[in-house]
């Protein structure tokens, strides 16, 4: 009698089936910061402007070519007109910005750290914010005359409002648990302000600072066309009377460069001061 041997085949799992499936993590961050990335947009606009001018798609009388504007800027700089106007505009914007920055920070701190200060200050600032600042020009001319004082005062108002609003909002948004912790630790008022208030308010302050810097240039370009005898706005106003579009574009480009450079400086300072924060931007 012959024995029959049966063989049972047992399926063996492959190595790939035994290993868990590793899901690839999706990157949601914007990625690494590109060097000089913010210049890409302005340079692209200038390139399109130059290409349209070279193709004669733009009326030279309405929008001169970039090389024409650069040539005009060179002539204005050589004859001394442009340096004088630039220095005058920088001086006005600097004085107004310094006054507005100081007023905005002091008022925000007084209103943010004191209920009495908030009752007296916040409503007044909100009322001032609701009134168009440039609408105050006729009244300030009657009060302060047509000299430099009223121009600096208007610029200061334009600057202090965004700085106050953002700094006050940052102070009001500080987590109350940090305040309770400071009280438990027995911190003094000065130590509380230095260790809790200032770090908590800095992000909002820098947002207001950027808006204030931009606002100083926006207010300046209007004010320098009102009863002024120097400055970039005055140069542009005179060029309008004589139909000199290239001179007007020179003034606008300088304003744009000032705004871009000042905003970049503020952002650089913000990145250094707030280097402890881990955000999408850094």
Image (cartoon, grey):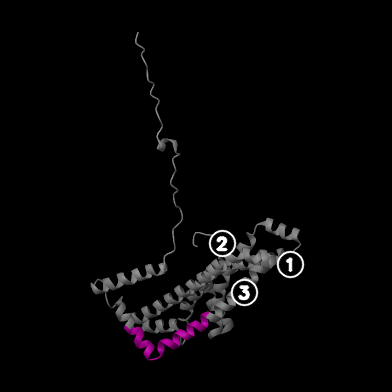
Disc number placed over residue 277 in the picture, else none: 2
Main secondary structure along the magenta-highlighted residues: helix
Q: Mark 3 points at which residue?
A: 103
**CA–CA distance in space, label 3 to label 2:** 27 Å
Indicate which disc, 1 or 2, sits on the residue closer to the N terminus: 1
Q: Kindly report the distance in space between the C-alpha atoms of the residues bearing marks 1 and 3.
A: 22 Å
Secondary element type, mark 3 = helix
Numbered disc in front, either 1 or 2: 2
Image coords of residue 227 (percent x, y): 48, 84
Q: Is residue 53 above or below residue 24?
A: below
Q: Name the residue under label 1.
A: 189
Magenta-colored stretch includes residue 49: no
Q: What stretch is highlighted in magenta?
A: 71-93
Locate the N terminus and report the quarter of the image it occupies.
top left
Q: Is residue 82 magenta?
A: yes
**From mark 1 to mark 2, how far is it between C-alphas?**
25 Å
Whether pointer 3 and pointer 2 mark residues with C-beta atoms closer than 8 Å, the reply is no
Residue at the outermost front position: 1
Picture disc at residue 17: none
Answer with left or right where residue 33 lies relative to residue 198.
Answer: left
**Relative to 265, is 37 on the left or the right?**
left
Badge 3: how crowded within 10 Å, few (<14), some, or many (20+)? Answer: some
């Amino acid at each position: 009698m012959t024995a029959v041997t049966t063989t049972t085949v047992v399926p063996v799992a492959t190595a790939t089936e035994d290993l868990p499936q590793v899901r690839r993590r999706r990157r949601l961050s914007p990625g690494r910061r590109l060097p000089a990335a913010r210049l890409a947009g302005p340079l692209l606009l200038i390139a399109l402007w130059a290409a349209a001018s070279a193709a004669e798609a733009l009326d030279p009388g309405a929008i001169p070519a970039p090389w024409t504007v650069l040539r005009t800027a060179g002539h204005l700089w050589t004859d001394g007109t442009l340096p004088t106007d630039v220095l005058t505009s920088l001086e006005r914007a600097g004085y107004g910005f310094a006054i507005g920055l100081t007023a905005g920070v002091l008022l925000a701190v007084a209103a943010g750290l004191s209920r009495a200060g908030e009752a007296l200050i916040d409503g007044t600032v909100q009322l001032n914010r609701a009134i168009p600042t440039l609408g105050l020009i006729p009244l300030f001319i009657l009060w302060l005359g047509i000299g430099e004082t009223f121009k600096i005062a208007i610029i200061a108002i334009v600057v202090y409002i965004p700085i106050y609003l953002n700094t006050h909002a940052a102070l009001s948004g500080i987590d109350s648990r940090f305040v309770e912790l400071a009280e438990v630790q027995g911190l003094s008022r000065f130590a509380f302000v230095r260790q809790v208030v200032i770090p908590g308010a800095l992000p909002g302050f820098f947002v207001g600072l950027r808006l204030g810097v931009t606002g100083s240039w926006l207010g300046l370009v209007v004010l320098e066309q009102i009863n002024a005898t120097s400055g970039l706005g005055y140069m542009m106003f005179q060029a309008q009377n004589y139909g000199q579009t290239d001179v007007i574009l020179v003034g606008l480009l300088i304003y744009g460069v000032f705004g871009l450079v000042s905003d970049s400086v503020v952002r650089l300072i913000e990145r250094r001061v707030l280097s402890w924060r881990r955000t999408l931007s850094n």
